[in-house]
Image: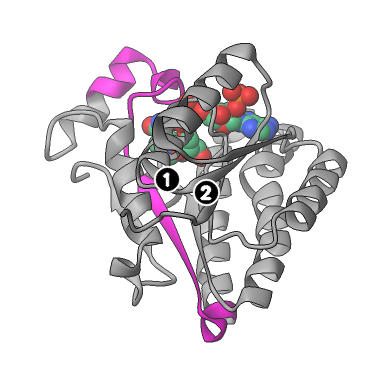
Amino acid sequence: MHEFDGKWVLITGANRGIGKGIAELFAREGANLITLCRSHSSETDSYLSSLEQRCGIQIKRYYADLSDHDVLNATLKSIVSENKVIDVLVNNAGIAFGASFLMTSVKKLKEVFEVNYFSQIMIMQMIVKSMLKNRSGVILNMASVGGIETNPGYLAYGSSKAALIYATKCLSKEVGIYGIRVNAIAPGLIETQMGNYKSEDEKDKVVQRTSLRRTGEVDDIAQMVLYLSSDKAKYITGQVIRVDGGR
Ligand SMILES: NC(=O)c1ccc[n+]([C@@H]2O[C@H](COP(=O)([O-])OP(=O)(O)OC[C@H]3O[C@@H](n4cnc5c(N)ncnc54)[C@H](OP(=O)(O)O)[C@@H]3O)[C@@H](O)[C@H]2O)c1
């Protein structure tokens, strides 16, 4: 018997990186998954099918590009009409973008915010309505230490994650009374494709100012997501938990 047996967990960007690690861990803990991904590949399909078989769970798959808000809206409507209970929402998908303040166009800033902020708000607004009907639910937003620290060269990414942190705290205060918890996780440098967005030199500098002197693993983040989603964290809401090896 696992804590998440029979629960339904919606995860965005579950096809790779941190999202894939989160999907794997929840599946091992008995949760059924609703995956919302952009890419549709036979590799991801067979991975998810093997996860279903290995863990004896169900996975419902949906597809949308988070920057296409019409498609996202239609997909979210299908998700809530076809899934009456969503116990946990993990807003994981996101994009990185680095450029100096002066070289960041407003167009680029808007593109980053479309994915890292506006789409996350749309998803929360739609899913929280369904959680309100059930008077329970947990929402986890994947922020970043980049939304807390101020790093030169990361205006678009950092401010989109800072905005997501504000949204997390704001929503937590509005829905706590209905038994819904909303938290954010702020990962440090994690070994994924996005983690490798930085140059080797930049990564090395980050590691040198990290107490544990190493980058993080996908599972370091997935374990925190699992904990915050569980009843062990039932008195935690409106928080941003750093998982960054000590920066
Ligand atoms: N890795 C780090 O060092 C780090 C640090 C702090 C915070 N984070 C945050 O953690 C989250 C996951 O990052 P990661 O490291 O796992 O990155 P990743 O390996 O690059 O994976 C990003 C995921 O987001 C999806 N995605 C990107 N743009 C999308 C769009 N327009 N519509 C739908 N899905 C989209 C990707 O889908 P596709 O496969 O279709 O591209 C992929 O599933 C992000 O929110 C990121 O900001 C990561």
Mark positioned earlier in the residue sequence (1 or 2): 1
Local crowd at mark 2 within 10 Å, few (<14), some, or many (≥20)? many
> Any magenta on residue 207?
no
Residue 149 visible in rendering:
no
Residue with the mark numbered 1: 144
**Residue 68 in the image: above or below residue 178:** above
The answer to which image quadrant residue 135 occupies is bottom right
Q: Nearer the viewer, residue 106 or 69?
A: 69
Along the viewing direction, whichever of 182 and 15 lies nearer the viewer: 15
What residue span does the magenta drawing correspond to?
Answer: 175-204
Residue 71 position within the rendered picture, expressed as x and y whole percent measured from the top left: 84, 39
Q: Amino acid at mark 2?
A: Lys
Q: In the image, what residue occupies the spot 31% across and 51% down?
A: 224
Three-letter code, disc 1: Ser
Q: Secondary structure at mark 2?
A: helix
Label 1 residue SS: loop
**The residue at label 1 has a CB less than 8 Å from ligand 1:** yes
Tell me which corner region of the image, top left, top right, bottom left or bottom right, holds residue 219: top left
Residue at the image position 71 percent from the left and 38 percent from the top: 66
Q: Is residue 194 magenta?
A: yes
Q: Are marks 1 and 2 in contact (CB under 8 Å)?
A: yes
Quadrant in the picture for the N terminus: bottom left
Q: Which residue is mark 2?
A: 161
| Left or right: 130 in relation to 157 | right
